[in-house]
Amino acid sequence: MQLSSFFAALLLATVMVARPGIAAAFATLPADATTGTGQARVVSVTDGDTLVLDNGVTVRLVGLQAPKLPLDRPNFREWPLAREAKRALEELVLNKRLTLHPATTPTDRWQRTLAHLSRDDGLWVQGEMLRLGWARMYTFPDNRMLASSMRGLEREARAARRGIWRHPYYAVLTPAGAIKALNTFQLVEGKVVDAAEVKGRVYLNFGEDWKTDFTIMVPAKVKRALARQGDDPVSLEGRTVRVRGWLKSYNGPMVELTHPEQLEVLDGGSDQRR
């Protein structure tokens, strides 16, 4: 190698270390993921969280919710940035071979395969969509593996205002703003004013009037699970939390927890990071 070429290569390596964004940095599958069950090539992408393989299988990316396209659903209004999210997934997977890592519950009610996906180069598809800001973490009681890793990648993207996080439609709501978003999936953040246990259920109230203010309802099973990880909901009075879930109307806007990963304690407890 000529001396000038050597110094050019050294300079490039130095720049890539100093600016990690230039390098091929991406999310990789955590060690606790399920073992892969085979490979297939992606032939089409339906939207930001659904794709079709060359063996005819439709895969729903478990753990994610990307902005929604109408997809021939009558009277369905397209979510902001849905086309951009679809393009982002296409760039990651179209015509590439993927390994499927099955979810705990392997299919949904539409018989789509539920799985985490990885590329041959190690990229974790769900993780990268979250890291780039094109989806939100969206877990279920029977499918919540890798939630901690996904939540961290989502948090990183939100702090950097990547993808959907620069659009007000996806902003984290205050308890007061929750009333305007009924029947939608949201993240809501605020300070718990009162924590009351009634017949085994815990109600986390975010205002003085529990009949109208935002509330998180914690069933007994979820209460016990939260307590085991150090976040007993009865002790959350005065604490700042973030919850994700579908907002429904029950004495004001309410999210009912179905599993612990929906709740983050932000000022102490098991998860202090924003």
Image (spheres, rainbow, N blue to C red):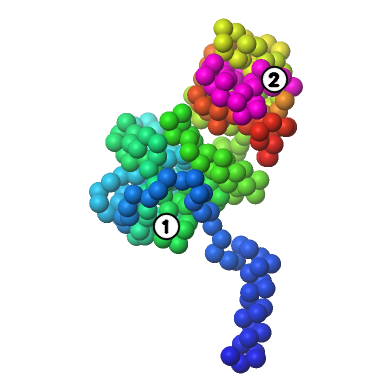
Q: Any magenta on residue 218? A: yes
What residue is disc 1 on? 119
**Picture layout, residue 50 above or below residue 218:** below
Q: Quadrant of residue 143?
A: top left
Q: Nearer the viewer, residue 117 or 46?
A: 117
In which quadrant is the N terminus drawn? bottom right
Residue at the top extreme? 199
Q: Amino acid at mark 1?
A: Arg
Residue 134, given in percent of the width and then of the height, sits at 51, 47
In which quadrant is the C terminus drawn? top right
Please tell me which residue is depicted at 60% across the width and 66% down the height of the picture. Answer: 22
User: Quick one: label 1 or label 2, which is nearer the N terminus?
Assistant: 1
Please tell me which residue is depicted at 66% across the width and 30% down the height of the picture. Answer: 265
Q: How many marks?
A: 2
Residue 75, given in percent of the width and then of the height, sits at 37, 31
Please tell me which residue is depicted at 61% across the width and 15% down the height of the picture. Answer: 203
- Mark nearest the camera among 1 and 2 is 2
Q: Is residue 36 visible?
A: yes
**Picture layout, residue 11 above or below residue 43:** below
* Mark 2 secondary-structure assignment: helix
Q: Amino acid at mark 2?
A: Ser
Please tell me which residue is depicted at 60% across the width and 44% down the height of the picture. Answer: 152
Density class for disc 1 (Cα within 10 Å; few <14, some 14-19, many ≥20) is some
Q: Quadrant of residue 39?
A: bottom left
Q: Is residue 73 left or right of residue 49?
A: left
Residue 135, given in percent of the width and then of the height, sits at 50, 43
Q: Is residue 173 visible?
A: no
Numbered tag placed on residue 253 in the rendering: none
Q: Is residue 86 left or right of residue 172?
A: left
Q: Quadrant of residue 210?
A: top right
> In the image, which residues are magenta?
215-238
What residue is disc 2 on? 235
